[in-house]
């Protein structure tokens, strides 16, 4: 009477597969929670790799210009031109080629 069934459940192999899926699901869920906490916390490990938010650079125009030149953001010619404009003097024009330099 009890042993005359056509379907006896998922069996041993089906139980292992579902168990593996459940293990992977919960491991992924816990990893997602840990990632979210570290990502959005100020003291988290990933927060140390983000640069601090600075809406504007502080300092005078000359200090900002010097900083841009020092970091290589602008070249020497641009730096000299902008510095001359800031100081109120006309930029120094480039020297014309001398007649002896012509080939």
Image (spheres, rainbow, N blue to C red):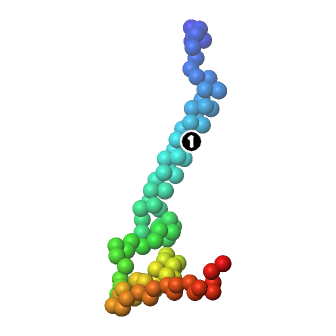
What percent of the width, then of the height, locates residue 70?
51, 83
Where's the N terminus, which quadrant?
Answer: top right
Residue at 47% over, 62% down: 38
Between 21 and 61, the residue placed more toward the observer is 61
Quick check: 14 above or below 42?
above
Between 101 and 66, which is closer to the camera in this rendering? 101
Q: Residue at x 56, y 42 (%)?
A: 24
The answer to whether residue 25 is visible is yes
Q: Report if residue 83 is visible in the image.
A: no
In this rendering, position of residue 98 left or right of residue 41? right
The residue drawn where x is 56% and y is 36% is 21
Assign a secondary structure to mark 1: helix
Count the marks. 1
Please state, as top left, top right, bottom left or bottom right, where the C terminus lies in the image. bottom right
Taking the image as shown, residue 7 lies to the left or right of residue 47, namely: right
Front-most of residues 34 and 22: 34
x, y percentage for residue 29?
A: 49, 47
Comparing 53 with 24, the one in front is 53
- Vertical relation: 81 (above or below) 48: below
Q: How would you rate the neighbour count of disc 1 (Cα within 10 Å): few for under 14, some for 14-19, many for 20 or more?
A: few
Q: Quadrant of residue 58?
A: bottom left
Q: Which residue is mark 1?
A: 24
Dividing the picture into quadrants, the one containing residue 87 is bottom left
Residue 42 horizontal/vertical position (percent): 42, 69
Q: Residue drawn 63% across and 84% down?
A: 101
Q: Position of residue 31 (x, y in %)?
A: 52, 52
């Amino acid at each position: 009477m009890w042993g005359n069934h056509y379907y006896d459940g998922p069996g041993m192999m089906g139980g292992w597969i579902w168990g593996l899926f459940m293990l992977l699901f919960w491991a992924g869920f816990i990893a997602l929670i840990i990632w979210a906490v570290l990502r959005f916390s100020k003291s988290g490990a990933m927060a140390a790799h983000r640069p601090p938010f600075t809406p504007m650079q502080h300092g005078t125009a000359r200090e900002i210009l010097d900083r841009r030149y020092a970091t290589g953001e602008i070249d020497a010619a641009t730096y000299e031109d902008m510095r001359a404009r800031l100081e109120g003097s006309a930029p120094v024009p480039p020297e014309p080629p001398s007649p002896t330099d012509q080939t």
